[in-house]
Structures are given as C-alpha cells and as structure tokens.
Image (tube, rainbow, N blue to C red):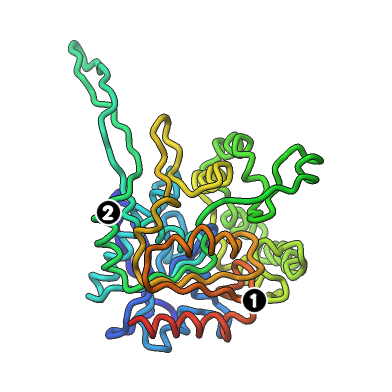
Amino acid sequence: MQPKIEHTHTQDNVRLALGRYKNSHGIPVILAHGLAQNSYFWDFPVEYHSFAKYLFTKGYDVWLPCLRGHGRGALHSDNKSDWSWNIDDLAIYDVPAIIEKVYQATEQHPFWVGHSMGGTLAYMYLQGAHYVKRIVAKEFIKLGNHVEWKNVHSISVSACEQKAHQRNAELRGLITVGSPVAMTWSYDPFLTKMMNHPIRQDLHILSFLSNRKLLRNTLNKVPYLPVSSALDIVEKSFGKWIRKCIHLPLAQIGTTKAFSLFWHPPNMNRHLIQTLMKESLNDVCSKVLEQFADWAENRTFRSFPNGNEKPHIYAEHFSKIDSPLLIVVGAEDKIAKPSVIYREGFLKMGSDNKKYKCFEKFGHNDLCMGLAAPTKVFPFIENWIAANL
C-alpha cells in the first residue's frame, strides 16, 4: 500500500508534497519529519514499523508532508533552487501551508505529530511566529537619465498573540517526539581545559556546533550538505553494490555506542539502520544547520540572525502554546535531553492539558522506528490522540 500524493503551495510559492493514507471520515493526523529526514521516517518501509500505517489501520486520515527541499521520488518538495531558507521559513511558510491544505481537504482540524525539528517547528508556529517587514532606509537608484528613491526593507520575526490564539484553536493537539526546546549545557572542566573548548554534558548535540564561526565559514561555501544525494550519485555511477558496500559497515557499527547520538543502539538492528540510511535520509540545508549552530552558541532558541535586527527568542513565548500537548522523549536521547525538555519546555508551555512521557531505553530516532517503538511508543501516542478527540 502506497500513500496518495497531494500538493500545496506556501505563501512564498514553494510547492510542497504530501503523502496521504486516506480515511475519508477519519480524524486527520499530520506526521512531520525532522532534520535530514523525509516522510519515509514516519512511514518506515519495514513491516510493523510504519507509524503512518499503524494510525491508518486505527481509522485516522494520515498525512505525511515533506518540508521544502525534502523527500524522495514523487514525494519531493521544491527547494527554491538555491537552498536559501532557514528554520524560520519552515515554521512561518511550510507549517501553515500544510495545516491549511489538510483542513481544506478534510474540513476537520488535525493533530500535529512532529519528530525532532518537526515538533520544534510546531512550537514556533503555535506561538504566532510571522515575518514583519519594515522600511529601514532609502537609497538612490539610477534609471537612465533620472534617479529614483528605493525603499530598503528589513524583515524580522515576531510572535502575534492573535495569530497564536487562532492557530492553537485550529489544531486538535500537538505531539512532539524528541523535539529540542533549548540548546543549554553544563561544562566539563577537565575536557574544557584539555581542548580549550566548552564541552556540553547536559545537552551534547554535535560538539562542533558550539564553534559557530568555524561552522559558518564552512557552510557559507556550500548551499547544502549532500547527506543523501551524494550516495545517489555514487550509486548511479557505480551501481547499487557500491551503496551496499557503504551501508553494510555503517549498519554494523550502528548498533554500537559509536552511534548513540542518533539512537539507543540496543533498540536498533542492522536492517533498520540500513533502511533508514537508504530511504529516509535527506540532504541538509546549510542555513538550517547554521541556525542550529546559532542556538548552540547562544544557548537558546531564536530566529535566524539578521544584521542589526533584534532576534526573536522563541523560548520566551512557550506560554502562548495552549493546545492539548503531549511531549514524548527518550531517556537515552543525547540530542533532545529529557531534563532540558522538561525544565525549559514542558514546564513553560501554556496548555492546561499537557502530558510528559519519558520512555526508558530509547534514544532520538528510535522513538519512531526502533525495535520497541511499535509495541511501546505507537500505542501510547495513539491512545493519547484518541483520548483528546
């Protein structure tokens, strides 16, 4: 069974692809992927490991959007050619376009289930995030024999109370799975002295992110990181066997502690890891990764740096989120640390109906497709959705 493919357009005219497992009278549920992933992450092509099919069999109308620049084959969304977008664009343009499309097609308000960045985008959207355009200067433009004035605009992010109220009312509920809310950490004095660099213990997401200057110099040279397309090119040039030669050793060591940043190794096997690398990996926009780096450097959750404009601090507006809320985390998650999510996110959310659930022996990605996900995580989330219809 394959999902039906539908499309929508964002306010800045980017065409997004959405897969749909249609249950005409079912409650719509949107499953949003995270960083470096696509819709196959939720519709994982291993028997019993597709949360999308699990919900479909329970009678829900399931939607699988691909954010701009994400997806494979027919389920691929545009990337504006130059990959010139950031996380703010995803929340301000992509999320409302997806929700509006689902509402127009079903005439019902949906649930939003987001993994990692897919949940973080919903936090941004529900607090009323939008762009504000204002004139900051004027400049002369010479046109032939005469000169005209041209306005110079600056665009910044703001949170609107009215938009937040409307958006929360139009969403049946929000479920976030391993979604970061802040980039905070504590210091390891010994390692800091040895490496002359602050090492995070509380939230150690990719240690290189804290040196944003080095990262910026690297990312400014490329529009995106070819996490997936590089392997596609290799496969087209040398055949499928070369891809297998790359995947096999990675899958082998993927069940060891070396990959514990991405999942809890005992909750994965080689087949799941190989499938993830082959089907659900996606290229990463450099500006998106740079914004994560900015969050790590400033230990917060804010809009993309824009010259002298004061950034919008998303982490200061969680009280505007009052939709029914379920926050799911893994006890072994090293990207979205449970203690940080509880302290900096859950306790600050404005919802009167909110629940926090920490699954033991789960990491980051395996919350959605690990060995124990179908028997532990899937039923728990579906039960919460059913209780909040």
**Residue 224 relative to residue 208: left or right:** left
Foreground: 169 or 366? 169
Q: Mark 2 or mark 1, which is nearer the start of the sequence? A: 2
353 or 79, nearer to the observer:
353
Q: Quadrant of the N terminus?
A: bottom left
Identify the secondary structure beneath mark 2. Answer: helix
Asked if one can make out residue 71 in the rendered structure from this viewpoint, the answer is: no
Mark 2 Cα-neighbour bin, 10 Å: few <14, some 14–19, many ≥20: some
Of residues 262 and 295, the one drawn nearer to the viewer in this rendering:
295
Q: Are marks 1 and 2 in contact (CB under 8 Å)?
A: no
| Separation of marks 1 and 2 at Cα, in angstroms | 37 Å
Q: In the rendered view of the protein, which quadrant contains the C terminus?
A: bottom left
- The reply, left or right, for residue 117 in relation to residue 266 is left
| Residue in the image at 66% along x and 50% along y | 186
Is residue 56 in sight in this rendering? yes
Residue extending farthest to the top is: 145
Could you say which is closer to the camera, residue 235 or residue 335?
335
The x and y percentages for residue 189 are 76, 45
The three-letter code of the residue at mark 1 reads: Glu
Horizontal and vertical percent position of residue 177? 51, 69
| Residue at 61% over, 61% down | 337
Residue 161, labelled with which disc? Answer: 2
Q: Quadrant of residue 320?
A: bottom left
Q: Residues within 10 Å of mark 1 (few under 14, many from 20)?
A: few
Q: Position of residue 95 (x, y in %)?
A: 35, 59
Residue type at the position of mark 2 = Glu
What residue is rendered at 75% in x and 42% in y? 192
Question: Which residue appears at 40% of the width and 81% of the height?
Answer: 385
Q: Residue 108 location, x and y as percent?
A: 25, 76
**Is residue 141 placed above or below 213 in the rendered structure?**
above
Which residue was labeled with disc 1? Answer: 360
